[in-house]
Amino acid sequence: MSEIANTPKPPYYAVIFTSERTEGENGYGEMSQKMFELAHEQEGFLGFESAREGLGITVSYWATLEDIANWKRNAEHRIAQQKGAEIWYQSYKTRVCLVERDYGFEKKL
């Protein structure tokens, strides 16, 4: 579902969402896909990376703190947040970080 995000030159912001799921699907996959699609439409959205192998970690990248706040207040996203707390997550933690520097490597085939 994810690959390494192609983010702009820093500074920008990262929202790190770490979670432990409850048992069962309960509509999680469909809502997760809907949230990724909706996030792409939000002003200031720069990309995301996600992995789940027991512990789930999703990192979304944003241009400004205001963009992050607007995403948090999005009506559809708020419904997903509520369902997450009630149905899908055993626990979760959200961290908001300023990315001051990034670098990487890509092997050429």
Image (cartoon, helix red, strand yellow):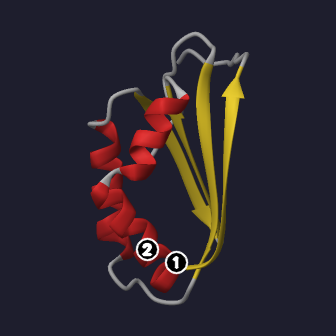
Badge 1 density bin: few <14, some 14–19, many ≥20, Cα 10 Å: few
- In the image, 109 versus 82, the foreground residue is 82
Residue beneath disc 2: 82
- In the image, 74 versus 45, the foreground residue is 74
- In the image, 98 versus 104, the foreground residue is 98
Work out whether residue 1 can be spotted.
no
Q: Amino acid at mark 2?
A: Gln
Q: Quadrant of residue 94?
A: bottom right
Q: CA distance from mark 1 to mark 2?
A: 5 Å
Count of numbered tags: 2
Residue beneath disc 1: 85
Residue placed at 34% from the left, 68% from the top?
Answer: 79
Q: Quadrant of residue 105?
A: top right
Secondary structure under the numbered disc 2 in the rendered image: helix
Residue placed at 56% from the left, 15% from the top?
Answer: 108
Q: Position of residue 21 (x, y in %)?
A: 58, 78
Outermost residue, bottom side: 23
Outermost residue, top side: 9
Badge 2 density bin: few <14, some 14–19, many ≥20, Cα 10 Å: few
Q: Position of residue 102 (x, y in %)?
A: 70, 18
Above or below, comparing residue 81 to residue 99 in the picture: below
For the residues labelled 1 and 2, say whether their Cβ atoms are less than 8 Å apart: yes
Residue placed at 43% from the left, 73% from the top?
Answer: 82
Work out whether residue 107 can be spotted.
yes
- Judge left or right: residue 70 versus residue 92: left
